[in-house]
Image (tube, rainbow, N blue to C red):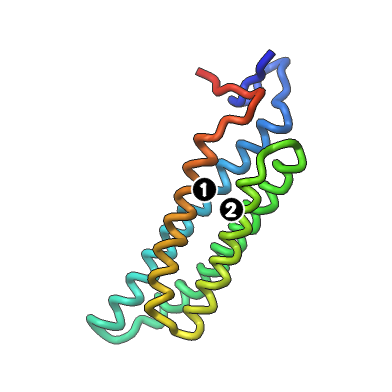
Amino acid sequence: MPVSCGPPGRGSPEPRLALVVRQLRIWSTVLLGVAIGQAGFGSGFGASLIARDKSDLLETVHRANAWVVIVIASVCFAIAARYRLQGGPAWPLVFAACLIGGGILQAALGTFRVVGPHLFVGVLYLCAVTTLCSYAWRHQPSGLRATP
């Protein structure tokens, strides 16, 4: 009998796999929001270099938020590892590992002011985070069904 992936109800405890799937959905969404914010901070900082005096505040926020992105990608990795150990697929784990590596690459490119590749990899990174979030919400583990 399939179990619900919805919120736990009375008398029917939520299975562990459904809880891990929910955590992956939540944290991938948080990662998407923070990554979009990072793109906004970066574009604001870039515009300040062209249109007016450099914004030290935007540069600081962009630099600090880069580490927030990496930390949240690491949380997604930990959740994906737990999911894999409970019988889930390997793709979320591999994807999250690549996002950590991509985040570290982005931080290095930004630190060393390699602007062209930093912008290009940043666009690819945002696309990858969007893909992880989309797949996390679309993926339906076998044995679980969505509630109507």
- Residue 127 lies, with reference to residue 121, above or below; the image says above
Judge the density around disc 2: few (<14), some (14-19), many (≥20) Cα neighbours within 10 Å.
some
Distance from label 2 to label 1 (Cα)?
Answer: 7 Å
Judge the density around disc 1: few (<14), some (14-19), many (≥20) Cα neighbours within 10 Å.
many
User: From this viewpoint, which residue is outermost toward the right?
Assistant: 85
In the image, what residue occupies the spot 66% across and 23% down? 143
**x then y, percent, for residue 29:** 50, 47
Given the image, on which type of amino acid does mark 1 rest?
Answer: Leu
**x then y, percent, for residue 124:** 43, 61
Check disc 2 and report the residue beneath it: 95
In the image, what residue occupies the spot 35% across and 81% down? 55
**x then y, percent, for residue 73:** 59, 57
Check disc 1 and report the residue beneath it: 132
**In the rendered structure, which disc, 2 or 1, sits on the residue that comes first in sequence?**
2
Marks 2/1 in contact by CB < 8 Å: the verdict is yes
Label 2: which secondary element:
helix
Q: Nearer the viewer, residue 124 or 79?
A: 124
Given the image, on which type of amino acid does mark 2 rest?
Answer: Phe
In the image, what residue occupies the spot 67% across and 47% down? 80
Q: Quadrant of the N terminus?
A: top right
